[in-house]
Image (cartoon, helix red, strand yellow):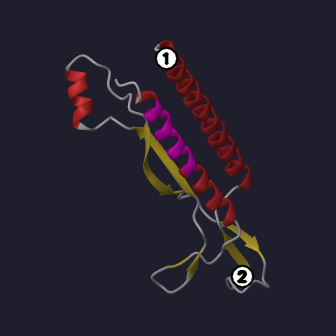
Amino acid sequence: MTIFSSLNTSASALTAQRLRMDVVSSNIANAETTRATIDEDGNYVPYRRKMVSLESKDTNGFSSFLQRAQGGKGGSGGVRVSEITEDDTAFEMVYNPASPDANEEGYVAMPNVDPLREMTDLISATRSYEANVTAMNATKGMLQKALEIGK
């Protein structure tokens, strides 16, 4: 573990949380998008909610296995985004016969985005981002104090 490893850990968390906030923002922006993609039949498909999965940065790398073999715990290298997946829940059908995307019965398939859930995820990502900024500032302060000892 180097002197900058805690800064690197916080930096990886900041990057992951920023991406998480970007995905939530995209979900909120497309909450009413009924024409996101076209399926193989040529029909429009509504936007599907996207979700971010995070994992420890050093779970599968060689350095992780080597560190564990030497008696270390491993997995202290921060966090990364493992994948961005689509939510497979069903679309909500809304009766709106005036919409150009309505089916023969007058129902329109709306995206599976719940603005309340997205706001909860956004607040969680924001709080995590702020906590990591605080940890980074504390580490920076400790490093500055360590440098003052040598004066």
Q: Residue furthest front?
A: 151
Q: Position of residue 33 (x, y in %)?
A: 66, 72
Q: Which mark is residue 59?
A: none
Residue 45 is one of the magenta-drawn residues: no
Residue 35: x and y in percent read: 62, 78
Span shown in magenta: 7-18
Which of 3/118 is in front?
3
Which residue corresponds to mark 2?
Answer: 105
Against 129, residue 134 (above or below) is: above
Q: State the SS at label 1.
A: helix
Q: Which residue is mark 1?
A: 146
Residue type, mark 1 in image: Ala
How dense is the environment of label 2, judged by Cα within 10 Å: few (below 14), some, or many (20 and up)? few
Q: Hey, which quadrant is residue 76 in on the image?
A: top left
Residue at 49% across / 15% down in the picture?
A: 151
Disc 2, SS:
loop
Relative image position of residue 63 (x, y in whole percent): 24, 33
Q: Is residue 112 left or right of residue 58?
A: right
